[in-house]
């Protein structure tokens, strides 16, 4: 995964978790950090949607764990040379 993909994933997770806070607690974390309006009036349906997006943000946190485990699995494969930087020919010669 490239650096830009990781940065985008982090920003999406931050936004989704912020919306989750709005949905569950009617509290805007980003506005609190940057001095904006912390609470606003939302309908029950809007807060429900915000809460669903917040739950998606929590699920997206697991992508980092999956990213690490998928790299480990590909490195465990004997035909892979991603971890040690070796070619298969180099392994056969040893």
Image (cartoon, rainbow, N blue to C red):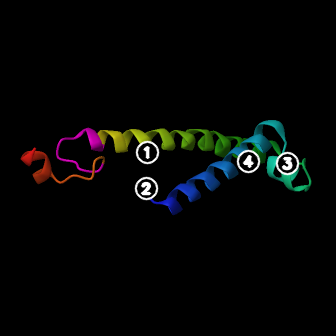
Q: Are marks 1 and 2 in contact (CB under 8 Å)?
A: yes
- Of mark 4 and mark 2, the one earlier in the sequence is 2
State the CA–CA distance, disc 3 to disc 4. 12 Å
Image: 19 above or below 25: below
Q: Where's residue 85, x and y in %?
A: 27, 53
Q: Where's residue 61, x and y in %?
A: 56, 41
Residue at 8 percent of width and 46 percent of height: 92
Residue highlighted by disc 2 = 1
- Quadrant in which residue 76 is drawn: top left
Query: Farthest left residue?
Result: 93
**Disc assigned to residue 53:** none
Q: Provide the secondary structure element on which disc 2 rests.
A: loop
The segment highlighted magenta reads 74-82
Nearer-the-camera pick, 86 or 30? 86
State the CA–CA distance, disc 1 to disc 2. 8 Å
State the CA–CA distance, disc 1 to disc 4. 24 Å
- Of mark 1 and mark 4, the one earlier in the sequence is 4
State the CA–CA distance, disc 4 to disc 2. 26 Å
Q: Provide the secondary structure element on which disc 4 rests.
A: helix
Residue highlighted by disc 3 = 42
Q: Where's residue 46, x and y in %?
A: 77, 48
Residue highlighted by disc 4 = 19
- Of mark 3 and mark 4, the one earlier in the sequence is 4
């Amino acid at each position: 995964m490239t650096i830009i993909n990781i940065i985008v994933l982090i920003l999406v997770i931050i936004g989704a978790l912020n919306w989750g806070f709005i949905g569950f607690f009617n509290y805007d974390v980003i506005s609190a950090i940057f001095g904006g309006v912390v609470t606003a009036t939302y309908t029950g349906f809007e807060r429900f949607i915000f809460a669903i997006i917040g739950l998606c943000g929590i699920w997206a946190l697991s992508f980092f764990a999956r990213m690490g485990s998928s790299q480990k699995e590909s490195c465990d494969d004997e035909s892979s040379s991603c971890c040690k930087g070796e070619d298969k020919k180099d392994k056969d010669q040893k």
